[in-house]
Amino acid sequence: MEPISFTEAFDSFDETWSPRLAAECNGQAVKLAKADGEFVWHSHESADELFLVHAGRLRIEFREAADAVLEAGEFTVVPRGTEHRPVAEPEAEIVLFEPSGTRNTGDVETDETAEVERLD
């Protein structure tokens, strides 16, 4: 029940597109990730995904809808089954809320697929 500092947590790692598990709540994972450049196109068939930008800017591209551009302090929810691609230019710090066990690349297996590590 100790508070978690976003600043300290984001300062504890440098890797991009490699989420860190910060907490779990009611079957939901709270993950922190640094983003830089383009990620892979993917979807999560059975999971909505909330993107909250802590710092920087994140554009989420959609094949079937207009892009969402998020500034620090803003969030959006990508509905389950929606193909999307996050893009950060420049780097962004993002908080993700999604069901525990959700893979970062969803239905796609790529070099970007990462096991979630716990924050130190």
Image: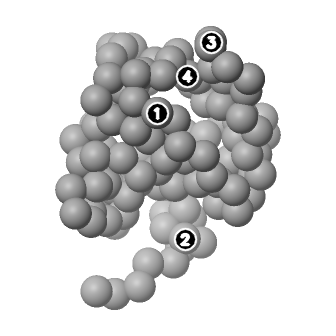
Side of 67 relative to 64 (left or right): right
Give whichever of 65, 18 is nearer the camera: 65
Marks 3 & 1, CB-CB < 8 Å contact: no
The residue that mark 4 highlights is 84
| Badge 3 amino acid | Arg
Q: Secondary structure at mark 1?
A: loop
Judge whether residue 36 can be spotted in this image: yes
Q: CA distance from mark 4 to mark 3?
A: 7 Å
Q: Position of residue 35 (x, y in %)?
A: 61, 40
Q: CA distance from mark 3 to mark 1?
A: 13 Å
Q: Position of residue 50 (x, y in %)?
A: 49, 47
The residue that mark 1 highlights is 79
Q: Position of residue 111 (x, y in %)?
A: 40, 17
| Badge 4 amino acid | His
Q: Which mark is drawn over residue 6?
A: 2
Q: Which mark is drawn over residue 111?
A: none
Judge whether residue 33 can be spotted in this image: no
Q: Which mark is drawn over residue 63?
A: 3
User: Which residue sits at x=21%, y=56%?
Assistant: 27
Task: State whether residue 5 is above or below residue 31.
Answer: below
Q: Name the N-terminal-most of marks 4 and 2.
A: 2
Which-is-in-front pick, marks 1 and 2?
1
